[in-house]
Image: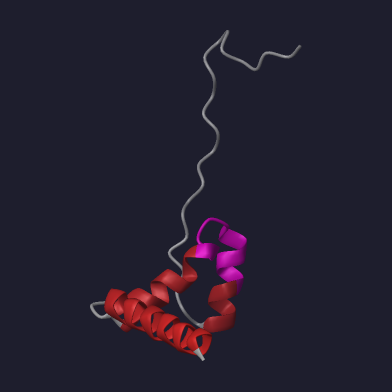
Amino acid sequence: MLELALNTAAVIGIYCAISWCLQHKTEQDIDDASLIPFADDPEVARRVELATGKTVNAVQISEPELRKPGWGKLEL
């Protein structure tokens, strides 16, 4: 019986904590947060946009910087 009470208290506590953390978030904020995992791959972001109709703010991945002469990889 004590175990059931503790488990119920834990579930209620987690629910209250999540509700408190999200109380000032708008629906747009939550939608943007759900699309973050797709933002680093432009091709996947495009597919998610086509599938969901939501705009993914994809990060533009730049080309690797050219290294200064003498600063290349050391191969042993």
Say whether residue 5 is visible.
yes
Give the residue drawn at x 57%, y 74%.
48
Viewer-proximal residue, 43 or 30?
A: 30
Name the residue located 31 percent from the left edge and 77 percent from the top edge: 22
* Name of the residue lying farthest toward the right: 76
Quarter of image, res 32: bottom left
Relative image position of residue 61 (x, y in whole percent): 51, 47
Give the residue furthest to the bottom: 1
Which residue does the image show at 49% across and 84% down from the upper left? 7
The magenta span reads 37-47
> Please, is residue 66 above or below residue 47 in the view?
above
Q: Is residue 18 left or right of residue 46?
A: left
- Main SS of the magenta part reads helix
Residue 69 x, y percent position in the rendering:
56, 10
**Outermost residue toward the top in this view:** 70
- The quadrant of the rendering that contains the C terminus is top right
Residue 18 at x, y percent in the picture:
36, 77
Q: Is residue 70 magenta?
A: no
